[in-house]
Amino acid sequence: MAGTERFSSRWGLVAAALGMAIGAGNIWRFPRVVAAQGGGAFILAWLVALLVWSLPLLMVEYAVGRKWGGSPLRALVGMLGRRWAWAGGFIVLCCVAIMFYYSVVTAWCLIYLLQTPFLPGDLAGLQGRWGQVQGSWLVVGATALCLAVVAAVVRLGVRAGIEKTCRILVPSLFVLLAVAALKAISLPGAQAGLQHLFAVDFSRLANPRLWLEAFSQSAWSTGAGWGLLLVYAGYGGTRSHVTSDCLIAGLGNNAASLLAALAVVPTLFAFLPVDEALAVAGQGNQGLAFVWLPRLFLQMGSWGWVVLLVFFAALLMAAVSSLIAMVELAVRALADLGWERARALPAVLLLSLAAATPSALWPDFFSNQDWVWGLGLLVSGELFCVAALRHGLDELIDSNSRALTRWWFRWSLLAVIPLAGTAMLGWWFWQSSQWQGANWSNPLLPTSLGTCLLQWGALLLLLLLANGRLARRVMLQRETTRE
């Protein structure tokens, strides 16, 4: 990693890691899932998932990034040799595929932030507005703008761009979420929402679905197994510390999720009967964020516009900070293949806009990509686990990573992560079979098992065929940077 720019301090890296982890899913997915799954019992299971899934994977990424640097492609070739370039390539391309449609999510957040003063207050009007926005060329234009802004940040470099931006976005995000949460819990009737959110019904812990939902939320929300923290860790200084930095990132991510839940769940229960509030929580992310929450926030009177503006500003900040990490990973991967950053960044920008356009224009295509590559992240997490075990955990340990010797860390990698990953994939595939019935294998349906296996299989076949070439280019570039 000679000549690579680095974060100015350990806290610069931590701010970037928090920005990477805290994304739109913290704000629009976690509140509805925790409400639908019974509140306090789900939170307990979610905290367990953080301890035995997300933190161990974050620590593996961090340790690997410190030792080998670069992208997951470079790191896995360095760890395991030339034959494993395909695995690093899968992790990279899975995250890049998510980057394509996630830029559309960022565009939605920008559009609604700018449209807040002009949103109708009735449910039918809000549903109509969402129908007008979704699938429009306005979203394509907003996507281009969001990608251009993020590319400008990445172009400034690690210190002047990523670090400085995250030092502003992350504290601002927490302040905005706290403002929205304080207003929500002060509403008449909010007590019912707080009771639902934090009361623990221990009998729910016997429900396997609750645990699978909790592990899925933690896996997707923290960024564990995405390869993003690996890239950032490669830019860290010698004073960075694996355990505490990952703990801050994980707990900070969970704190943001809880603040978002405090802003959303009490609002649902303050304005809706319990059954209707739970029904709304069971709807999709977009319906909650862009239809129901505007309707409910606008019932707060004069404060409603302010709270709604704060909510969409927080949602946009979370989306942008995560998108920055994804773009940096894509640029870093091309650099590891011999591209100059000055060429890699425009290439990533143009490719992202082209690949994001179908998700912006066709909701079914967006749902398909979210389904396929969201589940692909679970495979990426398993690949990191396999890589760490095959390489040997003792080889990853240095003076700043002693926690990798702890029994719970080894137990998580040896047993919990392989079993939990298999269980999560199996459960989501079973869910798909329930949704699609006899058509579960049809690859043309957006959320079928068939489309998932087809796209994964095609990508893996291409990577296996290109494995030798990828490995040679990575190793040549690594030797070049050492000279």
Image (cartoon, rainbow, N blue to C red):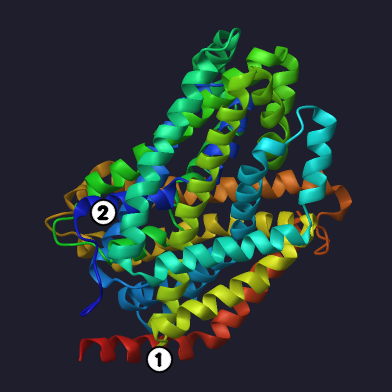
Quadrant (top left, top right, bottom left, bottom right) of the N terminus: bottom left
Q: Amino acid at mark 1?
A: Arg
Instruction: Note whether 2 is above or below 290 in the view shown.
Output: below
- Nearest the viewer among 261 and 341 is 341
- How crowded pointer 1 is (Cα within 10 Å; few <14, some 14-19, many 20+) is rated as some
Residue 212 placement (x, y as % from top left): 57, 38
- Nearest the viewer among 449 and 299 is 299
Residue 150 placement (x, y as % from top left): 48, 63
Rendered image: mark on residue 472: 1
- How crowded pointer 2 is (Cα within 10 Å; few <14, some 14-19, many 20+) is rated as many
- 341 lies left or right of 448: left
Quarter holding residue 39: top right
Rendered image: mark on residue 344: none
Q: Amino acid at mark 2?
A: Gly
Say which residue appears at 53% left-offset and 25% top-offset. 263
Rendered image: mark on residue 12: 2
Quarter holding residue 453: bottom right
Between tags 2 and 1, which lies in front? 2
- Residue 133 visible in image: yes
Instruction: Note whether 465 is above or below 143 in the view shown.
Output: below
> Mark 1 falls on what kind of element?
helix
- 254 lies left or right of 232: right
Say which residue appears at 34% left-offset and 88% top-offset. 477
Q: How far apart in space, not on screen, are marks 2 and 1 (Cα)?
A: 33 Å
Residue 471 placement (x, y as % from top left): 41, 86
Say which residue appears at 30% left-offset and 64% top-offset. 160
- Residue 212 visible in image: no
Residue 152 placement (x, y as % from top left): 45, 68
Residue that lies at the very extreme toward the left in this rendered image: 399
Q: Are marks 2 and 1 in contact (CB under 8 Å)?
A: no
